[in-house]
Amino acid sequence: MDARSVRCKNGSLWKVMAVGRSSPERLELVFESLDQPGQLLRGEVAAAQLGDLSDDELCFLIEEHGS
């Protein structure tokens, strides 16, 4: 499982984990808030690996799935 932390422009800090694949071209992601323990979000994105995504792209996904 690949993981990394990102700090978004709004100041929030998240741990992002690639937990699986729904297809060879899509990653299943879990976002864990490091500011609010217990807050988890799930998402899916077209990417070969977590390292292919910028912090801005990941923060956009967090905002999209958190609203």
Image: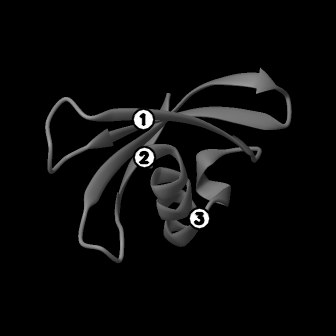
Q: Which mark is residue 66?
A: 2
* Image location (x, y in percent) of residue 29: 55, 35
Q: In this figure, which colouring scheme has been used for the structure?
A: one colour
Q: Are marks 2 and 1 in contact (CB under 8 Å)?
A: yes
Compare marks 2 and 3 and give the one earlier in the sequence.
Answer: 3
Residue at mark 1? 41
Give the foreground label among 1 and 3.
1
Quick check: 20 above or below 44?
Answer: above
Asked if residue 48 is positioned above or below residue 9 in the image, the reply reads above
Kind of residue at disc 1: Leu
- The mark that comes first in sequence, 1 or 3, is 1
Q: Are marks 2 and 3 in contact (CB under 8 Å)?
A: no
Mark 2 or 1, nearer chain start: 1
Question: What distance separates the C-alpha of mark 2 from that of mark 1?
Answer: 7 Å
- Image point 59% across, 64% down: which residue? 57
Residue nearer the viewer, 17 or 30: 30
Q: Which residue is mark 3?
A: 57
Mark 1 surroundings within 10 Å by alpha-carbon count, few (fewer than 14), some (14 through 19), many (20 or more)? some
How far across and down, in percent of the image, does residue 36 sit? 15, 43
